[in-house]
Image (cartoon, rainbow, N blue to C red):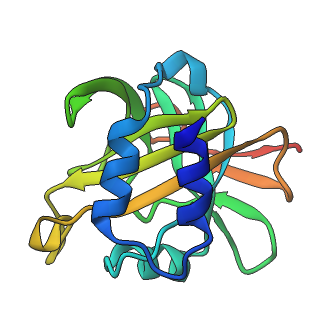
Amino acid sequence: MISREYFDQLMCQDATTEGELLTLFDMLEPVACEDILSRWRGGGFNTGHWLLPALVKLRWFGKWFVSPSDAKPMVCWDDTGALSSSQAMNGEASLAMMAFRGKISATVVYDGVPMFGHLRRVDDETLLGAVSGKAIGSAELLPDGKHQFFFLDRISAWPAPLTVHQSPASASATIHCAL
């Protein structure tokens, strides 16, 4: 339970160092893809990484892991007050078990950008993620070797209607999901 207490302590800080988050991340247990199939509300830690302000600008709300092969990593608020599965990352994602920092755990593998969201279990309702990968356009994902960290809290329902865009391979229509 020490890791949950440390997570809560870091959540209360205005700014957090990568070192503090890596210490926590390394303490946490891996999580299996099948155990995280759910809706998640997300947030980030202020480490000075450029990705957090970019997510705020996109109005990122969270992620939806429908199945290991169907992950919607960029559920964002739109101008109408609804949620949408954003295509800002050139597509959706899938989940895979991958090694990162000495443990094999569920990882978000983005379809359209060379980016990974490595996940660890804080508890059954909360995950901690560390972003790794190459560059998105001209922006390095690991400037000075530093990761962006995010958290996910499990939710039972979306707080607003959600529009999901299917990939062109499966359908060209937009699906509207009920709460």
Quadrant occupied by the C terminus: top right
Quadrant occupied by the N terminus: top right
Quadrant of the rendered structure where residue 29 is? Answer: top left
Left or right: where 151 falls relative to 19: right
Q: Can residue 140 be seen in this view?
A: yes
Q: Where is residue 136 in the image (x, y as percent from the top left)?
A: 22, 67
In the picture as drawn, the residue positioned furthest to the front comes out as: 2
Q: Residue at x 66, y 29 (%)?
A: 124
**Above or below for 31 versus 117:** above
Left or right: where 143 falls relative to 23: left
Quadrant of the rendered structure where residue 160 is? Answer: bottom right
Q: Where is residue 170 in the image (x, y as percent from the top left)?
A: 49, 30
Q: Where is residue 31 in the image (x, y as percent from the top left)?
A: 47, 24
Q: Is residue 113 visible?
A: no
**Above or below for 146 versus 166:** below
Q: Which of 32 and 15 is in front in this view?
A: 15
How many labels, in total? 0
Quadrant of the rendered structure where residue 103 is? Answer: top left
Q: Residue at x 37, y 44 (%)?
A: 25
Q: Which residue is drawn at 34% across and 71% down?
A: 17
Q: Nearer the viewer, residue 160 or 119?
A: 119
Q: Nearer the viewer, residue 62 or 6?
A: 6
Left or right: where 140 falls relative to 176: left
Q: Which residue is drawn at 20% across and 51% down?
A: 114
Q: Where is residue 143 in the image (x, y as percent from the top left)?
A: 15, 73
